[in-house]
């Protein structure tokens, strides 16, 4: 029977810290403000936006919702980002992606100031994750994994950490962050030969495979800490992770549930990044 | 008895390709030009510069040597870099480092245009290595490792690759480049617990520990490919790698010698990057 690494406890602790920071900033006359930039009306985007709005309200972060039509031109979207860059009352910008086909994702990402890039989509933020500097911010999901380890006092130093997945949103950045915390880090992916032999040796296993239930009993071993980053929906509409929870949970030492694990922490990390961006802006001012 | 992965053969092959590219560029009226920017007169820097000059002559790359006094101010150095950035006849800039103490290394690195950063020291280049885009260039030593694997037809895809070291000059970038080539990549370092148990499982082992002879017989196993990135000098002035060659060579399948391995390839990669920078500039023009 594994320890359940519930996101709610991490969220409570994070939210208390964020609230205290928000209060301090307001004393200095600053209201931490997040711009959510959405193109079109995709149900996923709307659901994420609702979650962010609720969390923002809880911690006292102001949100400005900017909604552009699905058919928006690249020029118009870039102009909107320029306005956000230039607006000193906006501290962070969440750009909901993927963007529609007429938009060049790379050009749009390049347009956002890393200082306002609170979800780690710009090259400036990603260079920071790679080099260990702090110009931008790491992707929120990667940071959420680190917050969970931190809250549950699982120190990566000297441990074997294995990451399944090599995306820029989670796999590569979380690998760099674990390395920064002195873990020995292995990155696996679809081209890995005999993945179970690699993942079984992990003391910390980050599952970001992007496929429901692919990590079964044969991938895990006793005592492991498993963070399941996957968010998938079954045909019946049930939310499930990338690990086969029923098969994995009885074997490992600790595991995040889905829902109620990494995903819920991500939204608080987003708010923490907005607050940190506001603090940095104040320091620069 | 291991196969010796001699750098000279890789260099010959690379140089032929570079010469052909230089000839083509000259037909287009472009002379690929490298600026070597040196501060002070450190023997290491002078030795590296001599090596680069010789290799440049071999392949037909023009070199402009810019030497500033050891006591140069940060302003003066930044102005020199601005001049290099603005000079369309210079395609790449090699800044010899470490810099003297009065200079802020981060600010100087940030000043160089990634397009001219042929040794991967800028955030733009490093973001490119991390994200797989091609604005700047990877560090030459990391690229040299990949060139050796490529020349000797050792395909990283699906193989376990282990990197000892996590520097921005070699460990982290070569890990990302091996990942890009579909290896399963593990990064080890001084905080790794029981490193031999990790390195023994490698099919490709990149040794960039930064200490002479630390990788002994207990770190390696039969059939491995070992690339030794270390350049160290014994008290007797003999150049040695980070692997204990006499102990390791009889066990593994293939190994680069020191000297005559990775280091010699690095200088040709530098020239290849200058030529590539000149090609990209021509495409942009």
Image: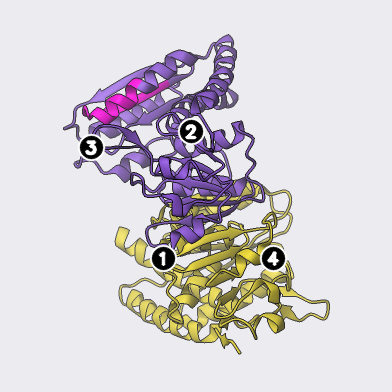
Chain colours: A yellow, B purple
Q: State the residue position of label 1.
A: A181
Front residue of A20 and B218:
B218
Give the image location of residue A230, x and y in percent: 66, 71
Q: Secondary structure at mark 4?
A: loop
Residue neighbourhood size for the residue with mark 3, other residues' Cα within 10 Å, grouped as few (<14), some (14–19), many (≥20): few
Which is more N-terminal, label 4 or label 1?
Answer: 1
Give the image location of residue B112, x and y in percent: 39, 35
Task: Relative to A37, say whether B276 is above or below.
Answer: above
Q: CA distance from mark 2 to mark 3?
A: 40 Å
Q: Which residues are magenta?
A: B34-50
Tags 2 and 1 both on a single chain = no
Residue neighbourhood size for the residue with mark 4, other residues' Cα within 10 Å, grouped as few (<14), some (14–19), many (≥20): some
Residue B38 within the segment the image draws in magenta: yes
At 79% from the left edge and 77% from the top edge, which residue is drawn? A234
Q: Secondary structure at mark 1?
A: loop
Image mark 2: chain: B
Give the image location of residue A20, x and y in percent: 36, 81
Task: Relative to A271, say whether B167 is above or below.
Answer: above
Front residue of A24 and B57:
B57
Q: Secondary structure at mark 2?
A: helix
Q: CA distance from mark 2 to mark 1?
A: 32 Å
Q: Nearer the viewer, mark 2 or mark 1?
A: 1
Query: Please, which residue is most extreme toward the bottom here?
Result: A1
Tags 4 and 2 both on a single chain = no
Q: State the residue position of label 2.
A: B115
Q: CA distance from mark 4 to mark 3?
A: 53 Å
Residue neighbourhood size for the residue with mark 1, other residues' Cα within 10 Å, grouped as few (<14), some (14–19), many (≥20): some
Task: Relative to B89, say whether A18 is above or below.
Answer: below
Q: Nearer the viewer, mark 1 or mark 4?
A: 1
Q: State the residue position of label 3.
A: B235
Residue B228: which disc?
A: none
Q: Nearer the viewer, mark 2 or mark 3?
A: 3
């Amino acid at each position: 029977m594994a320890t359940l690494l519930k996101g709610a406890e991490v969220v409570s602790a994070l939210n208390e810290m964020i609230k205290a920071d928000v209060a301090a900033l307001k004393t200095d006359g600053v209201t931490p403000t997040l711009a959510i930039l959405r193109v079109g009306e995709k149900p996923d985007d709307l659901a994420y936006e609702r979650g962010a709005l609720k969390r923002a309200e809880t911690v006292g972060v102001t949100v400005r919702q900017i909604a552009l039509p699905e058919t928006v031109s690249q020029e118009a979207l870039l102009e909107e980002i320029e306005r956000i860059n230039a607006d000193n009352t906006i501290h962070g910008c969440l750009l909901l992606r993927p963007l529609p086909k007429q938009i060049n994702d790379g050009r749009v990402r390049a347009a956002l100031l890393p200082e306002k890039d609170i979800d780690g989509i710009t090259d400036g933020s990603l260079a920071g994750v790679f080099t260990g500097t702090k110009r931008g911010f790491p992707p929120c999901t990667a940071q959420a994994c680190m917050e969970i380890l931190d809250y549950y006092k699982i120190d990566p130093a000297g441990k074997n950490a294995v990451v399944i997945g090599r995306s820029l949103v989670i796999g590569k950045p979380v690998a760099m962050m674990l390395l920064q915390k002195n873990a020995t880090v292995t990155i696996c992916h679809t081209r890995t030969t005999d993945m179970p032999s690699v993942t079984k040796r992990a003391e910390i296993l980050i599952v970001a495979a992007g496929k429901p239930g692919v990590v079964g009993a044969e991938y895990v071993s006793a005592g492991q800490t498993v963070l399941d980053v996957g968010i998938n929906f079954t045909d019946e509409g049930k939310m499930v992770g990338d690990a086969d929870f029923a098969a994995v949970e009885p074997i490992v030492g600790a595991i995040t549930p889905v829902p109620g694990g990494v995903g819920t922490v991500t939204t608080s990390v987003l708010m923490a990044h907005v607050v940190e961006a506001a603090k940095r802006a104040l320091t620069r001012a």
